[in-house]
Image: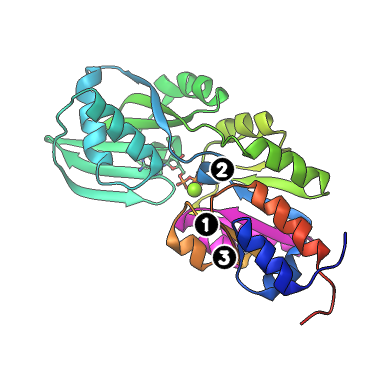
Amino acid sequence: ATPISMTVAMGQGARAGILFRNAGAIERMRNIDTIVVDKTGTLTLGHPALTDFATEGIAQDEALALVAGVEQLSEHPIARAIVASARARGLKLPQAEDFEALSGLGVQANIDGKRVLVGSRNFLSQHNIDTQRWDEQGEAWRAEAKMVVFFAVDGVAAGIAAVADPVKESTPEAITTLRSLGIHIVMLTGDSRRTAEAVARQLGIRETLAEVLPEHKARHVKRLQSEGHKVAMAGDGINDAPALAQADVGIAMGTGTDIAMESADITLVKGDLRGIARAVVLSRATMRNIR
Ligand code: ADP
Ligand code: MG
């Protein structure tokens, strides 16, 4: 490629919706060999919809009203999907009290005289709730690339919900281009291994790090760096901010949270991952030693 100056690269990037924070960001991007990508909201749209809901010992509408009543107080994309579905069914949601959210695990509250927990299988296990009745169903939905959450009413696993979060239309092309540029791609997610692998398989991503708690995302980036890799990390959430800061180049989705963008060296205005490949090409085209 023809060498171009930093200023030209920044201008070309900006016109394509790729905002480099400074010249240093371009400089570091040139040497990246590994890109770690968050799944939800980065590879996928981040706007899941409820697709499946099953209960035992409690009517579906009653359970959905309780679960949505608790999730009403959560900002998580899974929570929004559940609440939207309950509203669409015309359910009246009871008021939740003593609400508590555990980042990367789930939520709990008192509602309608009952104790309700909603979250990952691990979250319920931590509360000594046996999910065995639902495990096989959960695995089946995960194999369809759906995110699965379990819920318990008064200490008993009462059911399971699945939400589908489609891959962004632009993602497959972005992954193919990055690979052709010789970049290794690693998916990083708090979601279950089975779901993560189903999404990775669709996209031809060979390495996945799943069931990673938010506070451990940065640690995985650090480990890759200590193995000698130059690592870019792409994410959208509050959860991702420490990992974006740890990476040699942090890349935020402009469609994500402000905190992610504040921690980033590059912001992709439209949240389109093809911008990463363009950023690599632009950075490689810049002249060395230009200040
Ligand atoms: P990601 O890395 O995909 O952004 P998170 O760390 O936000 O994932 O969440 C990881 C997992 O924690 C979810 O897949 C879900 O099982 C559980 N979880 C977190 N928050 C909630 C919630 N509000 N309701 C239900 N489950 C939740
Ligand atoms: Mg996320």
Q: CA distance from mark 3 to mark 2?
A: 17 Å
Mark closer to the chain start, 3 or 1: 1
Marks 3, 2: nearer the viewer: 3
Which residue bears the numbered disc 2?
A: 39
Residue 176 x %, y %: 75, 39
Amino acid type, callout 1: Asp
Q: Residue placed farthest to the bottom in the image?
A: 291
Q: In the rendered view of the protein, which quadrant contains the N terminus?
A: bottom right
Q: Residue at x 61, y 29 (%)?
A: 198
Magenta stretch bounds? 216-245
The quarter of the picture where residue 266 lies is bottom right
Neighbour tally class for label 2: few under 14, some 14-19, many 20 plus, Cα within 10 Å: many
Q: Contact (CB < 8 A) between labels 3 and 1?
A: no
Amino acid type, callout 2: Lys
Judge by depth and name the residue closer to the eye, 15 or 187: 15
Judge by depth and name the residue closer to the eye, 272 or 2: 2
Amino acid type, callout 3: Ala
Mark closer to the chain start, 1 or 2: 2
